[in-house]
Image (spheres, rainbow, N blue to C red):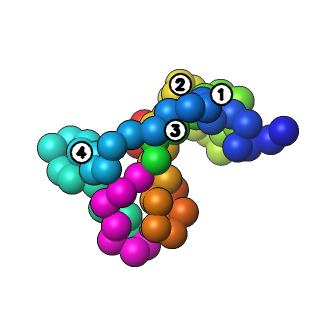
Amino acid sequence: MGFLESFNRGLSGDDGYAFAGRQVACSHCGGSAFNERSAQLNTMGLTFLDLDWANRSATVLVCKDCGHLEWFL
Ligand SMILES: [Zn+2]
């Protein structure tokens, strides 16, 4: 239960992702290999943070090397 359970299961992308025309690189280790997940922001209590505008799903890339999460709305 909890945060990780909100991710959709079974998604596994090929190495390399691009958003807004730029290759995604991990901001921690610089790696380019990610696992892709999606998360429903409206289940995560973000209204408390005045992020009602983001009350939709987000794409989350999980770095395969270090586990760092990169979020894309
Ligand atoms: Zn990384």
State which image quarter holds ligand 1.
bottom left
Residue 33 horizontal side relative to residue 65, left or right: left
* Residue 42 circle label: 1
Q: Give the camera-side residue of 3 and 13.
A: 13
CA gap between label 4 and label 2 equals 20 Å
Q: Name the residue under label 2.
A: 56
- For the stretch drawn in magenta, the main secondary structure is loop
CA gap between label 2 and label 3 equals 14 Å
CA gap between label 4 and label 3 equals 15 Å
What amino acid is found at the position of numbered circle 4 in the picture? Ala
Residue found 51% across the figure and 38% down from its top: 37
Estimate the x, y position of residue 45 in percent, counting from the top left. 73, 37
**Of the image marks 1 and 3, the number of the one nearer the N terminus:** 3
Q: Does the residue labelled 2 lie within 8 Å of ligand 1?
A: no
In this picture, which residue range is highlighted in magenta?
Answer: 28-34
**Of the image marks 4 and 2, the number of the one nearer the N terminus:** 4
Q: What element carries label 3?
A: strand
Q: Mark 4 points at which residue?
A: 18
Mark 2 residue crowding within 10 angstroms, few (<14) / some (14–19) / many (20+): few
Evaluate if marks 1 and 4 touch, with contact meaning CB atoms under 8 Å apart: no
Residue 28 horizontal side relative to residue 8, left or right: left
Residue found 18% across the figure and 50% down from its top: 22
Q: Is mark 1 within 8 Å of ligand 1?
A: no
**Of the image marks 1 and 4, the number of the one nearer the N terminus:** 4
CA gap between label 2 and label 1 equals 6 Å
What amino acid is found at the position of numbered circle 2 in the picture? Arg
